[in-house]
Image (cartoon, rainbow, N blue to C red):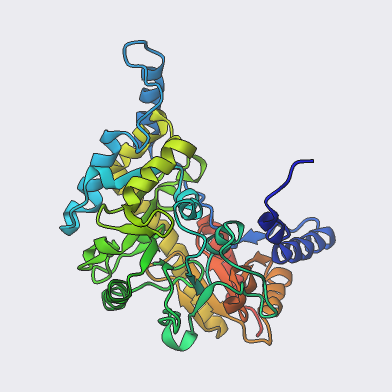
Amino acid sequence: MVLINSQFLKVVNDEIQSKIDKKVNLFQAINRNVSLIKLDSGDVVLPLAPCVMKAATQAIVEMGDETTFQGRGPMEGYPFLIDAIIKYNFKSYKVKIDSDEVFINHGTKEDIAGFGDILCRDNRIAVIDPVSQDYIESNVIGNRAGELNENCQWSHLIYLECKKEKDFMPEFPKLRPDVIYLSSPCNPTGCVMTREVLEKWVKYAIENDVLILFDVTYKSFITDPAIPQTIYEIKGAKKVAIEFRSFSKNAGFTGLHCGYTIIPKEISGYSLRAGRSAGLNMLWRKRQTIKNYTPSYIIQKGAEALFNNEGLDWICENVNYYMSNAEILRRSLTTAGLKFWGGVNSPYIWVESPYASSWKLFDKLLNECHILSSPGERFGAGGKGFVRLSSFANQSKVMMAGTRIADMKI
């Protein structure tokens, strides 16, 4: 019999999702003619931009012609897309990123989960709490997390507590980690790191020789010009930070899967066994040649189209649509007398339960308002007492949900 990686057995059973599924199945069995308004999802509902479809269609035509056919693409991505990314996302912020520091991928999840491949198992990992469990479970299967304790936290991970009194900004760890996962805007709390906060974290990482893995999947939803659009706006960040970006949420690429990771050449690590240092950029490049192909020529041509005027306008319209949804929900929650965070510069709203647990608010939204939310426990122990609402939904349904929330008796 084949031997398996036993670490997967630690994450294969999702008790929180099972509990959600049971509640939803019971509700639907009792209310067969009721349609749930789903505000629990991180998936988007708006379609692709016409310019993306046009570019992708043209790419398909090219693939059917021997003179323009494209086979397997460059392992780091096609230069036309990388050049567009650098021109639009970094030069406008006076940030210098070289073309060989950009790696096109199938979305941020793939690279965030896979980055541990080039890191030693002995690294101490710090994660914010609450947070997307992908960060944590990828380290569990990489054998860096230890065992699950009585507090539903992994024994070898360092949890950076995010308290409501500090607007869910993470506190510096008492024990120095080797790697810190940060995100802004944050999923699930919807809170955004200001320039001042980011400067403190970059300074901490430089002084303590710590690697920051920075997830900015939702950066397009930042409309406040005072808030950095990239961590590399902060002096010294290229020495300590790797940034993960995606086209999924702002351009409807959740069904196409395309994103990119920035790995500055300045960042290096040390091998105790080999007794020498090596650049993470070089190691990741090798890892990609072993494990991955980049998205197809067709998808990358579609992504490139997002950087023309039509594509940029489409992204702006998408963001405005979802942020209008967030504002509808914010007004309704205020009317209902509920306390919340996020929904500004972020598509997520983090709602504090007025009851003893987040599950009671989850049940009330489900059974009385016919709204499906995400209980805070889905995002770790730090999520207890909260639910997350997503603005990624059809606006007419969000308006209906808003009316129900406003009329809800707390």
Of residues 116 and 29, the one nearer the viewer is: 116
Where in the figure is residue 349, as x and y percent of width and height?
50, 71
Relative horizontal placement of residue 206, taking residue 352 as reference (left or right): left
Of residues 175 and 235, the one nearer the viewer is: 175
Considering only vertical position in the picture, is 76 above or below 276? Answer: above
Q: Is residue 314 visible?
A: no
Q: In what quadrant of the picture does the N terminus appear?
A: top right
Q: Quadrant of residue 237?
A: bottom left
Considering only vertical position in the picture, is 261 above or below 181? Answer: above
Where in the figure is residue 130, as x and y percent of width and height?
54, 74
Relative horizontal placement of residue 56, taking residue 88 as reference (left or right): right
Q: Is residue 267 visible?
A: yes
Where in the figure is residue 120, as x and y percent of width and height?
47, 58
Q: In what quadrant of the picture does the C terminus appear?
A: bottom right
Residue that appears at 68% across and 76% down: 149
Residue that appears at 49% across and 39% down: 291
Where in the figure is residue 86, as x and y percent of width and height?
23, 47
Residue that appears at 68% across and 82% down: 357
Of residues 273 and 383, the one nearer the viewer is: 273
Of residues 170 and 300, the one nearer the viewer is: 170
Relative horizontal placement of residue 298, taking residue 227 as reference (left or right): right
- Residue lying furthest top: 66
Number of numbered labels in the structure image = 0
- Residue lying furthest right: 30
